[in-house]
Image (cartoon, rainbow, N blue to C red):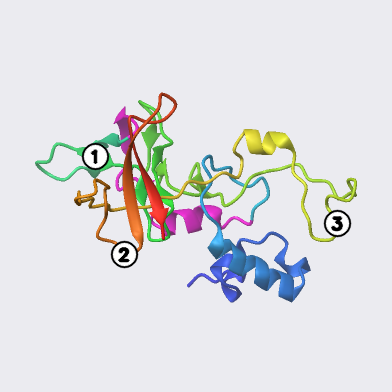
Amino acid sequence: MDVSTQQVVSVGASLIPFLEHDDANRALMGANMQRQAVPTLRADKPLVGTGMERAVAVDSGVTAVAKRGGVVQYVDASRIVIKVNEDEMYPGEAGIDIYNLTKYTRSNQNTCINQMPCVSLGEPVERGDVLADGPSTDLGELALGQNMRVAFMPWNGYNFEDSILVSERVVQEDRFTTSTFRNWRVCPVTPSWGQKRSPLTSRTWVKLRSPNWMNPVSFILVRK
């Protein structure tokens, strides 16, 4: 039986580097806040980690993991085909493993679940290797945030107390931008006065003839 020193803490706490040097209250806050992280558009794995990042990413189930070893025969944005090694093939089978990736699916928290391949054509893979990254994973490792250059210094009072000042480049490059999904179901009907009215109470959907700078057909939500 194997025993690890990281088993005495939770999964969230085991992802905090230099945990033994942190205040207990701050470590508790950091471990709980990791559960509230939303996936960024481009994940960036941490430069400093604890070694648990890969285990958490694989065990979370958001990544595509190779069931058997082989060679990547085909790969695109939505599918990965693996030619299985001969010594791992079952008798009478073709020896082809196909992994269909999840593309732009809404999660229960309205975040985006999108798997992206991290292998290339002709690359050999082993059993357990990560074939595609999911949300908040980068090259098979957990990536909740971004690697940023920080400085502890006053800046004209803009970072007073607990305020944080970020550069304009962070916003332009969408370093911390995330995407959310919302499903809206509209069932408009046409009453005698000509407006598009939905069955929802206190909400009226009005269909407009759009100018050139708008979409051809738009619905404006009018709240009463």
Residue 57 at x, y = what percent? 47, 54
Q: Which residue carries the number 2 mark?
A: 201
Residue type at numbered disc 3: Phe
Q: Which residue carries the number 1 mark?
A: 98
Residue 211 at x, y = what percent? 40, 27
Q: Which mark is residue 160?
A: 3
Question: Closer to the camera, 124 or 45?
Answer: 45
Query: SS at mark 3?
Result: loop
Of the two numbered discs 3 and 1 in the rendering, the one whose residue sits closer to the viewer: 3
**Among numbered discs 3 and 2, the one appearing first in the sequence:** 3
Of the two numbered discs 2 and 1 in the rendering, the one whose residue sits closer to the viewer: 2
Res 102 seen here: no
Residue type at numbered disc 1: Ile
Question: Closer to the camera, 215 or 131?
Answer: 215
Of the two numbered discs 3 and 2 in the rendering, the one whose residue sits closer to the viewer: 2
**Among numbered discs 2 and 1, the one appearing first in the sequence:** 1
Tell me the quarter of the picture where residue 162 sits: bottom right
**Among numbered discs 3 and 1, the one appearing first in the sequence:** 1
Q: Residue at x 58, y 62 (%)?
A: 34
Q: Residue at x 48, y 46 (%)?
A: 179
Q: Is residue 29 left or right of residue 85?
A: right
Q: Report, in whole angstroms, how far the alpha carbon at label 2 lies from the one at label 1.
A: 48 Å
The C terminus, quarter of image = bottom left
Query: SS at mark 1?
Result: strand
* Image vertical order of residue 23 relative to residue 199, above or below: below
- Mark 1 closeness class: few <14, some 14–19, many ≥20 residues within 10 Å: some
Question: Closer to the camera, 67 or 109?
Answer: 109
Res 36 seen here: yes
Q: Report, in whole angstroms, how far the alpha carbon at label 3 lies from the one at label 1.
A: 54 Å
Q: Which residues are magenta?
A: 50-77
